[in-house]
Amino acid sequence: MELDIIEMIKKSGRGARLTPAEIAAKLPTNNPAAPTMLRRLLDYLVSHSIFTVAPTTLPDGSVERRYGLAPVCKFLTPNDDGVSLAPFISNRNMHKCLVPSTLHLKDAVLEGGEPFEKAYGMSLYEYSGKHPEHQTDFHKAMSDHSTLVLKKLLKTYKGLEGLSSLVDVGGGNGATLSMILSKYPKIKGINFDQPHVVADAPVSHPGLEHVGGDIFVSIPKGDAIFLKWILHCFGDEDCIKILKNCYAALPEGGGKVIVCEYLLPNPDETTPDIAGNSVVQFDMCMMVVTGGMERTAKEFETLALAAGFQGFQVAGSAYNVKIMELLKKN
């Protein structure tokens, strides 16, 4: 993605295919080995169904390989909203953090603790606060991901109707709430995150307020609370603390926490499908970077009940992100 090959092929026209030499000619390089290196790189990506290839035998008997875009590439180039999953997948600063952390996985297994903290002497969140370039890339990736997921969610999920206030916990720059308020302008939106995060967050909607704080201390009050990709960052004990604070922030007469997370395959599944495999990969990433984890629906229900909620249900999905409701009843 850093070489912009997907966008290059896309701009060449619908159904276009390019040879490695044609791609190399469009890159700022004089490296004579570039076409060969690109062919090897593209063949690897073909094996993962990211590109397609069409071999053609030329008059001299040689074989020319022309590469095109596989269906998944539509998620890796900017859509009509100008967003894609590319920043999420190719977050160089995150990868720089992740690789040294994996070298401490054995130590974490044997000694306890988080691989990231063993590598850097601080948590991911402390690191992000001290490295603005990491924070910028991270929130761009989260913003684009939120836009893709929320656009799908807002078409299918009706659980936001009738709310007068909504608190987005860990909402970053407010992209998620901005989309929600665009469809539900009567909702008062509170974007809640760490003070250094909301300090530079834009006020992109008149009904949106940014509030800085600590999720382990207290959470702003609202009719409902929105948690997207938050709980998977933490172990069970911390999740219960967060959910108890959410419970306290909801009205006495009842309310709900809306949780958007990937769900691990059930324990009785021996061979996960493609979506399940991707969640297992994220589970490994969370263990290395934050000490958190992905969970099954049953595990989320257990957390909800431990925090005092009286009801739990999986209320929908947006792509492979599941929408769960944790219910506080009067």
Image (cartoon, rainbow, N blue to C red):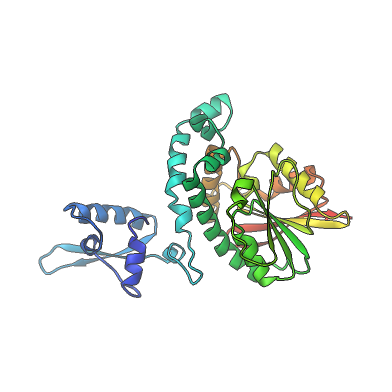
Image quadrant occupied by the C terminus: bottom right
Q: Give the percent coordinates (x, y) of residue 209.
A: 69, 59
* Extreme residue toward the left, this view: 60
Left or right of 317 on screen, residue 26: left
Residue 274: tell me if it is visible: no
Q: Give the percent coordinates (x, y) of residue 175.
A: 59, 61
The residue drawn where x is 55% and y is 39% is 124
Q: Out of 75 and 2, give the one closest to the viewer.
A: 2
Using the rendered view, name the quadrant where residue 223 is placed.
Answer: bottom right
**In the rendered image, the vertical position of residue 298 relative to residue 1, given as above or below:** above
* Extreme residue toward the front, this view: 199
Using the rendered view, name the quadrant where residue 111 is placed.
Answer: top right
Q: Give the percent coordinates (x, y) of residue 75.
A: 46, 64
Left or right of 152 on screen, residue 164: right
Residue 4: tell me if it is visible: yes
The residue drawn where x is 48% and y is 67% is 82
**In the rendered image, the vertical position of residue 80 relative to residue 3, given as above or below:** below
